[in-house]
Each structure stands twice: as C-alpha cells, then as structure tokens.
Image (tube, grey):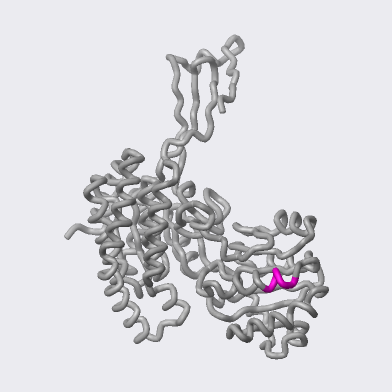
Amino acid sequence: MASLEERIGLLRKGAAVLAASSDEARKKALAAMADAIDRERDAVKAANAEDAEAARREGTSDALLHRLVFTDSKIDSAIDGLRQLASLPDPIGRVREKRELDPGFILEKVTFPIGVIAMIFEARPDALVQIAGLALRSGNAVVLKGGREARRTNRALVSIIASAVSGVIEGEWILGIESHEDVDALLGMEKLIDLIIPRGSNSFVRYVMDHTRIPVIGHSDGICSVYVDASADADMALRIMIDSKTQYPAACNAAETFLVHRAIAPVLLPAMGEAFGRLGIVIHGDEETARLIPSAIPATEDDYHTEYLALECAVKVVGSIDEAIEHIAEHSSHHTDAIVTSDDGAKRRFFQEVDSADVFCNCSTRFADGFRFGLGAEVGISTSKIHARGPVGLDGLMTTKWLLSGNGETVAEYSGQGGKRFHHKELM
C-alpha cells in the first residue's frame, strides 16, 4: 500500500491536471457528484446510522450528534449546493488587474487554483460534500480529515465522489484520511500541501498553527453576539434573537450572547424570558437581566466567553452602544456579530468598529453562510484577516499569478537617465 506521502504526491500531480481542466468538465464532474450521492443515498444513510449509533453509545453530546446525523434534508441541501456551484462563473483565469506598462507591453493579474488543500473539520458529513465540491469547482486537489465520529459516512462519501468524478476528470484529486497520526504527518508536508484549513476548538486550531510551516486559514470558536440597541423594534429584535439562537443551535454562527440596551430592556427582556422559556433555552444573565427574567441563572464572566452550541445563552444589559462594542471586542471570537437598530448612526458605528468577519444589522447571525451568501458553499468561516475572511467560498480557494506579455522589452531600456518611461495605463 502506498504511503501517505506517496498518495499526496499523486494528489499534487492530479491538482495540476484539475487546474488545467475546462470549465465544462468541472461542471460536468459536479453534476456527476450530485447524481451519485443522490443515487447512493441509502448506502450513505446506512453508514451514517452506524456512526450515529456508535456516537450515542460513547455518550456524544447532543450538539455533535445533531451535526453528525445526515438526514434526507441535509443530503438534499448538499446536492443542491453542488448544483449551485456548477452554476457559478468559472473562478479560474479571471483577470483581477490589467495594466499596460508601455504600448503593447501588458501586465495581468489572473486567478489560479492554490493547489493541494488539506481540510480538517468536525463530524459533519454535509461539510465534506461542500468542501469536495468547492475544491473541484476551484480546480484544487483536497485532503479531507473529518471528525472520527463520522468516519464510516466520510469513507462512503469519498468513495462515491471519487468514483463519480473519475469518468470526467483524470488523475487523483481527493483523498480521505482518518487517523491523528496521518494529520501529524500531513502537517510536515510543506512541499506537497499548499494550504491547511482547520475547523474546531481554539486549542486545536492553535495546535495546527504551532506544528506546521504550511499556511493556515483559521476558524475556531463562534462566540457570536446580538446587540439590541435602544432604538430597536422590540418585536423585530425578539424574532432575530430567537432565530439566531434556535434555527440551528449547534452551528458556529448561532448567537451565544445577547446584549440589550438598558432603555429597551424592561420591554424586551420579559418577552425574551417568556419566549426562550417556552423554547427550553437556558439563560445566564447579569443582575439586571435576572431582575427582568427571574428564571435566569446568575452569569459568570466565563459565560460570556462560552460557545454553548446548544439551547443555552448569556445575556447582559448594557448602557450604551459603546459598552456593547467594548464587550464584543473583549469576548468575541470575531466570527459574526449583529446589531438590531433603527438608528443609521448606530448601524454605521457598529459596522465600522466591530472587528469581526461578518457584521450584520437587523437580521439573524445565521445568515453567515457561504450558501446563503451566494458562494455555492463554504469550506468554513475564516476569522483571520489575511487572504480570506468570513465565509470562504471559491474566491478564498484561489491565488493569483502576474502574467506579463511583451515584445522583446529589456530592463536596460527603462534604466538610466535616458531610459524609457513606463506609462502604466490601466486597462480595466
């Protein structure tokens, strides 16, 4: 059996083939992936049922189980995502800049695939489909390491995807790995792997960053806040709060903290307490919150640093937008934060001063998603500021090349006191 390094070496060769493939071929391959997953859904669900049963026996949390179970609706969404990816413009070969240095001497900045991407993610089979689809559409080879709880499902999906695409795209482009030893070996392969995208806890992402020289796009905790301003419509605010917390509590873009301006708290918090109580949401609140929501558990400082991923949240009453922004700066994971307000000035300040990848106004934090943004899918939501930030879709999986086309020009012609001058004419 070939070693991991040999298999990734084959992947690197396959990446060159995939990068040179036509737009039509990659679209056709995505359609083949979607059809194959639909056709083999019973086999996928059977593997997933085994994973879920094993996870339950091991006492896996409800939040992780919710992510793990690959229901028909999740399979349908994953298939729809692949078809949407196929409908998007080709990300390869797009001209970002075009400049004439001198007549007939043309410089272009053009998009190209990164190469081989290693993706380490949680036990979410739908994420595997999204990532594989994004890699294929963007012309990148991909190494996939999903959470061990989903290993049977992931194994089935990688096999189905590889087989479906083999008749359309030549060469190896997808590889599933399963062991921690493989991950540790992968971290040392800087000559074969161009980018690592880890998703998980802060400690895990930090471990990856500390143990590799390969560039890393980090995405760890999703400690997302909703701030309700003094001018907010209380009914709108409550709808947004409920959706941000309950639409999918296990997601990284679900709200964990609610900051409520003191002026609206007497109206909003009792209604919130009643609504959240009906929905079974546990509230950890400061003293002012507890006076208005008697069922609230006294909050500690740790509660405002906690990603619950469940029907549980922290609430704090604040005296101003300044206090809200300061709280977010101190406690946020810089993922997604939202304001509910009717004051345009407050909206502008929040957008300008909150340093997060996604900053929203008058809508749910759950909109922080590549599919909802129209990116087709995402490999994750990056909280770093270099290369890609926010939902990382096709554009985040591309790099660029500078392409210069001349007619025999030499640097000597443009040097010295009598040398020619560049006119740097922008062509786009």
Residue at the bottom extreme of this rendering = 294
- Magenta segment, which residues? 234-238
Query: In the rendered structure, does residue 136 fall within the stretch colored magenta?
Result: no
**SS assignment for the magenta stretch, majority:** helix
Query: In the rendered structure, does residue 237 fall within the stretch colored magenta?
Result: yes
Q: Is residue 104 above or below residue 214?
A: above
Can see residue 120? no
Q: Residue at x 47, y 78 (%)?
A: 63
Q: Quadrant of the N terminus?
A: bottom left
Residue 135 percent coordinates (x, y): 38, 51
Residue 401 percent coordinates (x, y): 45, 35
Q: Is residue 348 left or right of residue 154?
A: right
Q: Is residue 68 above or below residue 175?
A: below
Can see residue 304? yes
Residue 190 percent coordinates (x, y): 37, 51
Q: Residue at x 34, y 72 (%)?
A: 150
* Figure label count: 0
In depth, the one of 386 and 176 nearer the eye is: 176
Query: For residue 270, what is the image quadrant?
Result: bottom right
Residue 360 percent coordinates (x, y): 65, 59
Q: Is residue 424 above or below residue 266?
A: above
In depth, the one of 69 and 216 nearer the eye is: 69
Residue at the left extreme of this rendering = 1
Q: Residue at x 30, y 49 (%)?
A: 29
